[in-house]
Image (cartoon, grey):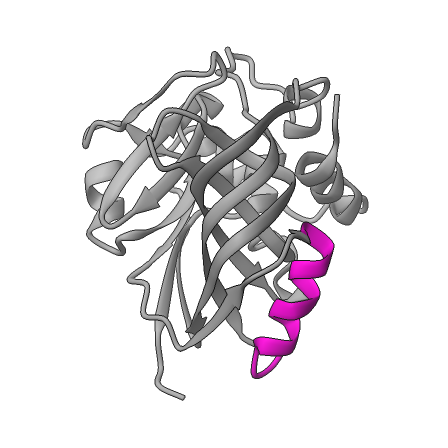
Amino acid sequence: MNRHEFFQTSLISSLLDGVYEDEMSIGELLSHGSFGLGTFNALDGEMVILDGQCFQLKGDGTTRPAAMDQHTPYATVTNFVPSNRLEITQPLHRPDLSKLIDELLPSANYMYALRITGHVDWVETRTVVQQSKPYRPMVEATDGEQVVREEDLDGVFVGFRTPVYQRGISVPGCHVHFIDDTRTLGGHVVDFEISDGAVEVCVGTDLRLRLPVSTEFEHADLAPEDLADQVAKTEHAQA
């Protein structure tokens, strides 16, 4: 196994506590990796990075290339170098595919970037909506978000599978965003079924973590007692 670095700006626990602004630009973020996900300042939509291009998936349903001078309060990127591949030849629901991916991974103790491409029978996504100050905690900001279901389309899932011991730093388990091949729709993945395609896995052995330098981050509660519940709600809650 070769060493491979993932780069992350800020912490998921910081985002949960409402720290939605940072000075990390998209241009600087892309200097650290050409594949990844995250969000934008003020929670202005979901982020997908593919082949060095950053896309902004907004709460109103529009999708556009992000500008280099936009900013992000939280994102994870890497230069995707696949080490394992799994062909998908039959319909697989998200939990079924997750089990197959687990069997493909050499260990549960490393980080993994996942790129899943192919024909999607259906996918359910939701997208954060731009917030206004004073910022609410993320469980409140995402409460009641509309879940959108799209069917019969081709696209790409961009994800990171993170060990449980990184809870508070990253999203433990699998954090996935989706964008279709026309680059016109997508969002944070709630559930899906894929019938044809492939899973590629990139192993991460090193994590480079950048923390915000701001008053908001200095005073954030990064270790709440209900951290696991907050993560679960923001990741999987449906309207």
Residue at 21 percent of width and 44 percent of height: 28
In the displayed structure image, the side of residue 215 where residue 105 appears, left or right: right
Q: How many marks?
A: 0
- Displayed quadrant of residue 142: top right
Q: Position of residue 8 (x, y in %)?
A: 41, 54
Q: Nearer the viewer, residue 23 or 109?
A: 109
Q: Is 25 above or below relative to 80?
A: above
Residue 1 falls inside the magenta stretch: no
Residue 106 falls inside the magenta stretch: yes
Q: Position of residue 83 (x, y in %)?
A: 39, 77
What is the magenta range? 93-108
Q: Is 34 above or below relative to 72?
A: below
Q: Position of residue 157 (x, y in %)?
A: 47, 47
Q: Is 134 above or below relative to 15?
A: above
User: Which quarter of the rendered picture does the N terminus lie within?
Assistant: bottom left
Q: Position of residue 72 (x, y in %)?
A: 37, 34
Does residue 220 show up?
A: no
Q: Is 73 above or below relative to 33?
A: above
Residue at 38 percent of width and 40 percent of height: 48
User: Which quarter of the rendered picture does the C terminus lie within?
Assistant: top right
Residue at 27 percent of width and 46 percent of height: 29
In the displayed structure image, the side of residue 211 where residue 136 appears, left or right: right
Q: Does the magenta stretch mainly form a helix, a strand or a loop? A: helix
Q: Nearer the viewer, residue 64 or 213?
A: 64
